[in-house]
Image (cartoon, helix red, strand yellow):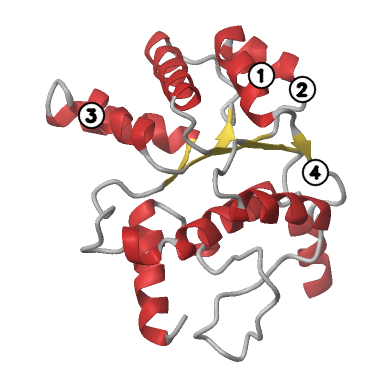
Amino acid sequence: MDAYDLEDYFQMLKHCGVPKAYRLWTTGPSAPITDPRIPLTRDEHNCNLGSLIDKHADAKVVDWLLVSGPVGRGKTTWVTAAFNDWAQKRLRRYKEGGPGHRNPPVWVSEAAMFANADRSSVKNYTGRSTYMHQLVGAPLLVVDDLAGSRKSPTEWQAGAIRHLVAERHANLRPTFMTTNLKTWDELEEHYGDHIVSRMIERTRGIVTLGGPDRRLRSGARSE
């Protein structure tokens, strides 16, 4: 990408909801930090996951991906890197003025998804359903930190998640998810079998990250 495309790229990622700290990540080769025009960098840890995401990001039909692991193992980094690469390849479609601008890919945490829906409901009585409809129809959706609050979902939240997963499952819309929960049983206890059975079929398994806490390791080096 040239400098003009890079500016459009970062604006598109902002529009899609990608947090600022993750907009520089890519699953591609490492880029020199000295050149600010080139997106940074592939994480050299958890490279098996990197290869898997490379495969998903390059596929003509991107499938579902569920990444699990304890805090600090790189789940959000890798899944967002795959999201960024997917969006970069479709930059001209989803940047402002492009044919897909009004229906961009979406990055959202589960907590933010529910908060955004609640805020939308204040505007008008259909606001909540309108917001969730955007997520249902997004060409690619990242839901970060599933069950992050560890609280049981409310009746409305459970219904919203059930509808979101069922519709994206039925319409083969690619969906990337992260969670600290380790097993399908834990996910089923939290969300119910209606949701988890569809996750199992689309993802064909949980990708689990191990290793040390990357944040703590980084902090130790800086001391």
* Residue at mark 1: 187
Tell me where residue 4 sits by quadrant: bottom left
The tag earlier along the polypeptide, 1 or 3, is 3
87 horizontally vs 65: left or right: left
**What element does badge 2 sit on?**
loop
Q: Are marks 3 and 2 in contact (CB under 8 Å)?
A: no
Q: Is residue 115 visible?
A: no
In the displayed orientation, state which residue is furthest to the right: 211
Cα separation between marks 4 and 1: 17 Å
Tell me where residue 9 sits by quadrant: bottom left
The foreground one among 74 and 10 is: 10
Residue 26 sits above or below residue 117 on the image: below
104 horizontally vs 38: left or right: left
The tag earlier along the polypeptide, 4 or 1, is 1
The foreground one among 13 and 1 is: 1
User: What's the residue type where badge 3 is placed?
Assistant: Thr
Residue 132 image point, x, y percent: 32, 29
In the displayed orientation, state which residue is furthest to the left: 124
Q: Are marks 4 and 3 in contact (CB under 8 Å)?
A: no
* Residue at mark 4: 209
